[in-house]
Image (cartoon, helix red, strand yellow):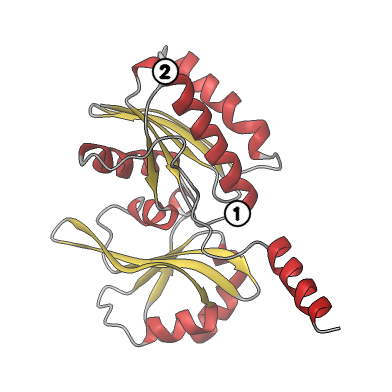
């Protein structure tokens, strides 16, 4: 089986081609360009460099959220376009699951955090037990202080490994709050990677867990700022 993998859930844009024989190509960029400018050119580049015919793909795996509202919409639209053009299904891979999966068989509790603004992060907690990837806490939006309190109360003999774009934003606060041993993932594995989305996507594809382009919907977990502002204005107007 072969997958085209896409991740644009955060600041990083990433695409990959991965299959049963391994990772064919991976292209990741974290720079000041929009995902609408980068994703398709990046995918075109790796297919040309590897002489890969996209029609040989069995599915497209996409980081399905949570994350940046704009990034998720662009990733979703790109995945849908590819799926429709090639007549293949979409594999929806939870963003934080894929981030944690990057730290394959790491000891301790893996704690990806994405900045959700307003002193909150998107987070899930994961570990590896007997070689199996285990979800300890499902994806959620949670306050930084609440997360630190939760981690302090958990049994984590191997300590906690934190990664994600929430780290540079909240590292100082986390260091002041965390009582459990903790460390931060190094630069080459501390952000989203389409290769990891594809690796998890292959497992889901083998189990037949796919959706059509029409069925695919990103997982936002929270309402967008525009939606929150509109609701606040509607409440204010209703009270006048």
Quadrant where the N terminus sits is top left
**In the rendered view, does 97 fall on the left or right side of 232?**
left
Total label count? 2
The answer to whether residue 40 is above or below residue 204 is above
Q: Nearer the viewer, residue 225 or 142?
A: 225
Separation of residues labelled 2 and 1 (CA atoms): 27 Å
Instruction: Give percent across and percent down for residue 171.
Output: 56, 72
Read off the residue under disc 2. Answer: 54
Residue at the image position 53 percent from the left and 84 percent from the top: 145
Disc 2 on helix, strand or loop?
Answer: helix
Residue at the image position 47 percent from the left and 25 percent from the top: 84
User: What crowding class fits label 1: few (fewer than 14 Cα within 10 Å), some (14-19), or many (20 or more)?
Assistant: some
The answer to whether residue 194 is above or below residue 232 is above
Read off the residue under disc 1. Answer: 68
**In the rendered view, does 229 fall on the left or right side of 169?**
right
The answer to whether residue 211 is above or below residue 191 is above
The disc label shown at residue 23, or none? none
Q: Nearer the viewer, residue 50 or 235?
A: 235
For the view shown, which residue lies furthest in the right direction? Answer: 240
User: What crowding class fits label 2: few (fewer than 14 Cα within 10 Å), some (14-19), or many (20 or more)?
Assistant: some
């Amino acid at each position: 089986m072969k997958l085209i993998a896409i991740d644009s859930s955060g600041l990083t844009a990433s695409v990959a081609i991965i299959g049963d024989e391994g990772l064919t190509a991976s292209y990741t960029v974290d720079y000041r360009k929009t995902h609408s400018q980068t994703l398709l050119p990046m995918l075109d580049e790796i297919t040309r460099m590897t002489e890969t015919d996209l029609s040989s793909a069995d599915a497209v795996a996409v980081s399905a959220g949570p994350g940046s509202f704009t990034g998720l919409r662009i990733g979703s639209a790109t995945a849908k376009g590819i799926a429709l053009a090639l007549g293949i299904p979409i594999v929806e891979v939870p963003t934080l699951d894929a981030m944690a999966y990057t730290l394959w068989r790491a000891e301790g509790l893996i704690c990806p955090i994405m900045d959700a603004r307003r002193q909150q992060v998107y987070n899930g907690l994961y570990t590896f037990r007997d070689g199996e990837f285990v979800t300890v806490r499902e994806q959620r939006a949670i306050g930084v202080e609440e997360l630190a309190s939760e981690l302090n109360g958990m049994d984590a003999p191997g300590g906690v490994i934190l990664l994600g774009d929430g780290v540079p934003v909240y590292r100082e606060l986390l260091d002041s709050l965390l009582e459990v041993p903790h460390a931060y993932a190094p630069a080459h594995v501390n952000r989203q990677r389409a290769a990891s989305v594809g690796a998890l996507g292959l497992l889901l594809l083998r189990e037949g867990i796919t959706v059509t382009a029409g069925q695919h919907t990103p997982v936002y977990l929270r309402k967008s700022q525009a939606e929150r502002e509109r609701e606040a204005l509607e409440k204010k107007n209703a009270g006048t």
